[in-house]
Amino acid sequence: MEDESKLGMNHTGMQMAPIEGPRAVAFAREMPVDVLAGRDAFAMERTAYIEVADRIGSVPVPGTVKGMMQTALGKITGKAPEVLVDKLGQRLAFERTGTRLYEALITKVEAAELGRTKDMCRDLHRICSEEGQHVLLLKRAMESIGADPTAQTPCADTSAVASMGILQVITDPRTTINQCLDAILTAELTDNAGWELLIAVARQTGHGAMADSFDAALEEESEHLAMVRNWLASRVLEEAT
């Protein structure tokens, strides 16, 4: 694999157009755009759509007796069990995507055929395996309260959309290992925050044992985050010097 960063014929900047660049600036000053008016128009248009839009899906009604009893009990005690189900569905979907992200990153790293990536590959395989174990953990947690782990909850849906850019970066054959690490760092930061919130929601809704079962997953995710940070920092600093 070529060096991570290299000089080339990048024509996107104005310095590469010493004549046309200043002309474009002069034209912009002579024919200014009413930015505020345009912003207000966009805001009004978006507001109109927001006011009539439906929500992105719904949390499914429990399809089991256990699920209906858990939901009824939660409502009686003033809780909102559907919030927990939604966040469980979100983490399950994100962890499932996480295994795909790491599978793609492993392919990228192995294709580099660099001696220094052997240890990284070993650790990436372990992380990928742990992400898969987290999927099973969340599946069992949802089943324990009668929820359907195969359902796409609203937060799972929006989380999948948000993850699309990260997956596109890592699966793009042109991207470098460092660029992929940069992308997956975003995923790990989100993942850690997501687990912290899920644990808090589980405790808030009276599922302390479930929250306790997630502590080990959060600890593993914290380790994943630290490893990705260290890989990225060491590789970029090495390249810079």
Image: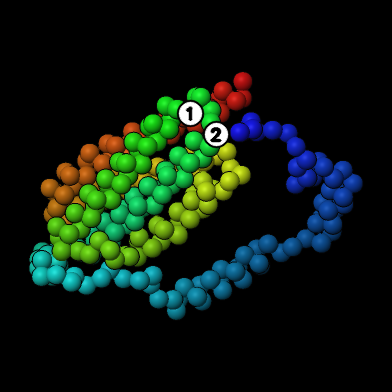
Residue 137 seen in this snapshot = yes
Name the residue nearer the viewer: 58 or 65: 65
Quarter of the image with the C terminus is top right
Q: Which residue is mark 2?
A: 112
Q: Is residue 88 above or below residue 16?
A: below
Q: Residue 2, labelled with which disc?
A: none
Name the residue nearer the viewer: 99 or 157: 99
Task: Name the side, left or right, on which 76 lies relative to 225.
Answer: left
* Residues under numbered marks 2 and 1 in contact, where contact means CB atoms less than 8 Å apart: yes
Could you tell me how far apart the alpha carbons at marks 2 and 1 are, in whole angstroms?
8 Å
**Image point (41%, 58%), residue name:** 160
Task: Name the side, left or right, on which 59 lies relative to 207.
Answer: right
Quarter of the image with the N terminus is top right
**Image point (81%, 41%), residue name:** 15
Quadrant for residue 93, please give it: bottom left
Q: Position of residue 200 (x, y in %)?
A: 23, 49
Q: Report the amino acid beneath label 2.
A: Ala
Query: Tag 1's secondary structure?
Result: helix
Q: Position of residue 216 (x, y in %)?
A: 22, 39
Q: Is residue 118 above or below residue 224?
A: above
Task: Name the side, left or right, on which 209 lies relative to 29.
Answer: left
Decide which of tag 2 and tag 1 comes sooner along the chain: 2
Q: Which residue is mark 1?
A: 117
Quadrant for residue 65, please give it: bottom left
Q: Report the amino acid beneath label 1.
A: Thr
Q: Position of residue 72 (x, y in %)?
A: 11, 69
Instruction: Estimate how packed mark 2 is, as few (under 14), some (14 to 19) or many (20 or more) residues with alpha carbons within 10 Å.
Output: some
